[in-house]
Image (cartoon, rainbow, N blue to C red):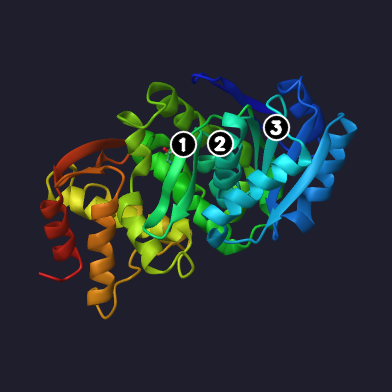
Amino acid sequence: MKTIHVNTGRPYDILIGGGLLEQAGTRCRAALPKAKKMAVVTDSAVSPLYLERVEAGLKQAGFQTLACVVPAGEASKNPKSLSDLWEAFMAFGLTRTDAVAALGGGMVGDLAGFAAATILRGVNYVQIPTTLLAQVDSSVGGKTAIDLKAGKNLAGVFWQPSLVLMDPEVLNTLSDRDFSSGMAEVIKYGCIADRAFFDFLTAHASRVAIMETVESVLYTCCNIKRNVVEEDERDTGRRMILNFGHTIGHAFERLGNYETWTHGEAVAAGMWDAAQIGFGLGVSGGDDGGMQELKELLEAFHLPTHIARLGGGLDSRAWNAVVEAVGLDKKSAGDELTMIFLKRIGEAVAVTGKKDAVLENLAAIYGRS
Ligand code: GLY
C-alpha cells in the first residue's frame, strides 16, 4: 500500500492499495474515531457492485450506516439531489461528529462532498473513488460542487476530505470507455508537470499495461496533485494548471448536454485544442509544442481530439456554445480569461489574456474565421 499525506488546512491521507475497499470500516474508524454514524452516498451503477461490502465493513467497525443512492449520471449533480441528501442526513440523525462517505465516481464525490460541506455547517467526509477519473483527480483536493443550468460545477465549496481510500481493484469493473476517460486526466499530469511520466505512459499505452503498474500510476498522479494543492488550496494561482484542457473541455461537455461525451473525452479534445492555441500564441517551444506526441498518446487510449468539429469546422450551434462556455469559465474576469498552455510537455503555464484573442485562435483552429 502507498500513502500520500496531503498537508492542506485540514490535512488527510490518501491510501492507495489493492484490498482497501474491504478495509473501509477499519480505515474510516482510524481516521474518524469519534463518528458514530456514516451516511454512504453512492449511485445506482456503483451500489450493486460495492455498497454491501463497504456498509458491512463500516458496521463491523461500529458505524451505524445509511445508504443514499442517487441515479447514476451527471444529471444527479443538481440542487434537488443536494437538498434530498440534506433531508436524508437529518432524518438519519447525523450530528457534527458524524460523517459522510462518497462511494463512486466524480459525480458522487462532488455531490456528497458538497452535501457534507454544507450540512450542519460542515461534517467530515471520506472519499472512496471507484473510477480512474475520480481516483486521479476529483477525489483529491477538496473541490465539491453541483451543476447549474448555467454550467458545470458552478455552485460549490472547498472542503477537504478526512481520508481518501483508493482501491485499484475497483477499476477492473470499468468499461473501456470509462477507463479511457480517466486516462485523459492521467495524461494531463504528464503534460503539465512530469515529462518522464508522459514518456512512461507513451511506453505503456494500453489498459493492460497501465493496470500492471496501476498503484504507481495512481501514486504519481495524486502526488503531483498533492504538490499543487498544498501550494494553492483555493485555486487562485498554481492550481489552475490542473485545468489544462478544461476550459474548452467544459464547452464540449455542455454542448453534448453532459451525455454525448464523457468528461475525459471532452478534456482530451480540450487539451489538444489548448496545445494548438498555445503553440499558435508562441507560448509553447519546440517544433510543434509537443502537439504530435500528445495527439498520438490520446489516440493510443482511444480518446478523441476532434469532437464537435462537424464537416471540418464547427457549426453555429457548437461555436456559440464554445463562445458562451469561454465566457462562463470560472477563470474569467471581465473581458479577460486565464487559460493553461504547455511551455513544453511536462511544464504548464497560466496565461491571462483577452477573451477575444482566445476566441480568435479558436476560430482559426475550428475554421470559423
Ligand atoms: N480538478 C481540478 C482541481 O482539482 O483543481
**Label 1: how many residues lie within 10 Å, few (<14), some (14-19) or many (20+)?**
some
Secondary structure category for the residue under label 2: helix
**Vertical placement of 353 versus 255: above or below?**
above
Say whether residue 197 is left or right of residue 245: right
Expressed as whole percent of the image width and height from the top left, the position of residue 126 reads 66, 34
Residue type indicated by callout 1: Val
| Spatial CA span between label 2 and label 1 | 9 Å
Secondary structure category for the residue under label 3: strand
**Label 3: how many residues lie within 10 Å, few (<14), some (14-19) or many (20+)?**
many
Q: Which residue is drawn at 78% across and 33% down?
A: 37
Residue 164 shows in this picture: no
Q: Are marks 2 and 1 in contact (CB under 8 Å)?
A: yes
**Label 2: how many residues lie within 10 Å, few (<14), some (14-19) or many (20+)?**
some
Considering depth in this image, is 120 or 206 the residue closer to the camera?
120
Considering depth in this image, is 290 or 77 the residue closer to the camera?
77
Residue 179 numbered tag: none
Check disc 2 and report the residue beneath it: 118
Q: Residue at x 39, y 34 (%)?
A: 194
Q: In which quarter of the image is ligand 1?
A: top left
Check disc 1 and report the residue beneath it: 157
Check disc 3 and report the residue beneath it: 99
| Spatial CA span between label 1 and label 3 | 17 Å
Say whether residue 289 is left or right of residue 2: left
Residue type indicated by callout 3: Ala
Say whether residue 201 is left or right of residue 333: right
Quadrant the N terminus occupies: top right
